[in-house]
């Protein structure tokens, strides 16, 4: 059955979205001792990645719905939209602030992989205190 | 019932199954002398990823599938990886498996599909746009490794 999804207009581009990650799988240790996020962190079986709206939930609540070893990464709603995704409200058993990213137009798996990588790099750049487009 | 493992033809030097040419011999080809120190550790990690429980990522993720685990071992066994730093190995929620390297601002992800029949690469110059591609031959994968090392 076809289901129509709508971008949540009440979620602003500057709003942060929280995603649980599994560090052992989703972060790669670097020679300097830091860890960087890989594109695998945003991958899901359905190709649409789950998140929670930060202004509506605490990190603790989001983590409580996962596993003890998990951590949270933050992405800007505007960055997700800029890659061609709607942010669809989808309250789940964990919290009403649950949303998922849904491609606005059909995307190939390769394109989704690229988008996930781009999001991971945005997180890495923010963690490193710089914007990815200004560094080499 | 056990199912036959189908592997893509990547121009491999040798297959997972022992080649007929070796069946009548009383020795096996030795490759480990040139293997990087991290290779056994990575093989062990691949095995452990196949034992993950379903929903390991709290989003319904599957354990690494047999086909993906086998294919990634075949790749690592057939590529020139002696000078490569230790990769990060990750389970992918659909049952696939990924390798990740980052060297001097060059970032490479190699992903094997759950059935082991498709291999994708994603190259990113940090700060730039990711470039995706499919691995059709071993040379494609080797070129990607050479790129990440800047050679």
Image: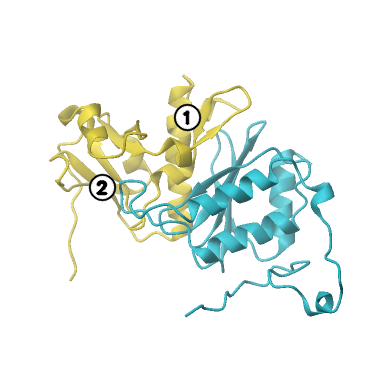
Determine the residue positioned at 17% across, 63% down: A3
A125 displayed left or right of A80: right
In the depicted structure, whether residue B47 falls above or below residue B38: below
Chain letter of mark 2 equals A
**Chain A colour in the picture:** yellow
Residue A1 percent coordinates (x, y):
17, 71
A3 displayed left or right of A120: left
Specify how the rendered protein is coloured.
by chain
Quadrant occupied by the C terminus of chain B: top right
Q: Quadrant of residue B28?
A: bottom right
Front residue of this view, candidates A92 and B68: B68
B15 displayed left or right of A57: right
- The chain in cyan: B
Q: Which residue, given by chain and number where applicable, does mark 1 sit on?
A: A124
| Count of residue discs | 2
The answer to whether one can see residue A86 in this image is: yes
Residue A15 percent coordinates (x, y):
25, 30
Residue A119 percent coordinates (x, y):
42, 39
Name the disc covering residue A100, or none: 2
Mark 2 surroundings within 10 Å by alpha-carbon count, few (fewer than 14), some (14 through 19), many (20 or more): many
Q: Secondary structure at mark 1?
A: helix
Q: Quadrant of residue A99?
A: top left
Determine the residue positioned at 54% across, 42% down: B129
Chain letter of mark 1 equals A
**Quick one: label 1 or label 2, which is nearer the N terminus?**
2
Q: Secondary structure at mark 2?
A: strand
The answer to whether one can see residue B123 in this image is: no
């Amino acid at each position: 059955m076809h289901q129509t999804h709508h971008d949540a207009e009440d979620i602003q581009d500057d709003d942060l979205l929280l995603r649980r990650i599994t560090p052992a799988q989703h972060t790669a240790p670097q020679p300097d001792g830091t860890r960087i996020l890989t594109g695998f962190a945003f991958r899901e079986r359905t190709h649409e990645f789950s998140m929670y709206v930060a202004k509506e939930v605490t990190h603790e609540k989001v983590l409580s719905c996962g596993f003890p070893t998990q951590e949270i990464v933050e992405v800007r709603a505007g960055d997700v939209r800029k890659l061609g995704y709607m942010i669809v409200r989808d309250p789940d058993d964990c919290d009403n602030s649950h949303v998922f990213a849904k491609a606005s137009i059909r995307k190939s798996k390769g394109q989704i992989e690229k988008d996930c990588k781009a999001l991971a790099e945005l997180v890495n750049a923010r963690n490193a205190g710089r914007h990815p487009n200004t560094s080499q | 019932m056990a199912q036959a493992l189908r592997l893509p033809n990547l121009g491999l030097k040798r297959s997972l199954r022992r080649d007929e040419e070796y069946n009548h011999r009383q020795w096996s080809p030795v490759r480990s002398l040139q293997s990087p120190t991290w290779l056994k550790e990575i093989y062990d990690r691949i095995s452990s990823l196949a034992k993950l429980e379903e929903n390991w990522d709290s989003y319904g993720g599957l354990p690494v599938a047999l086909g993906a685990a086998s294919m990634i071992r075949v790749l690592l066994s057939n590529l020139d990886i002696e000078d490569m730093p230790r990769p990060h190995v990750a389970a992918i929620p659909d049952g696939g498996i990924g390798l990740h390297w980052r060297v001097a601002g060059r970032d490479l992800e190699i992903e094997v599909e759950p059935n082991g029949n498709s291999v994708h690469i994603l190259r990113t110059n940090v700060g730039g746009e990711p470039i995706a591609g499919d691995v059709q031959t071993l040379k494609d994968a080797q070129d990607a490794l050479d790129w990440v090392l800047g050679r």
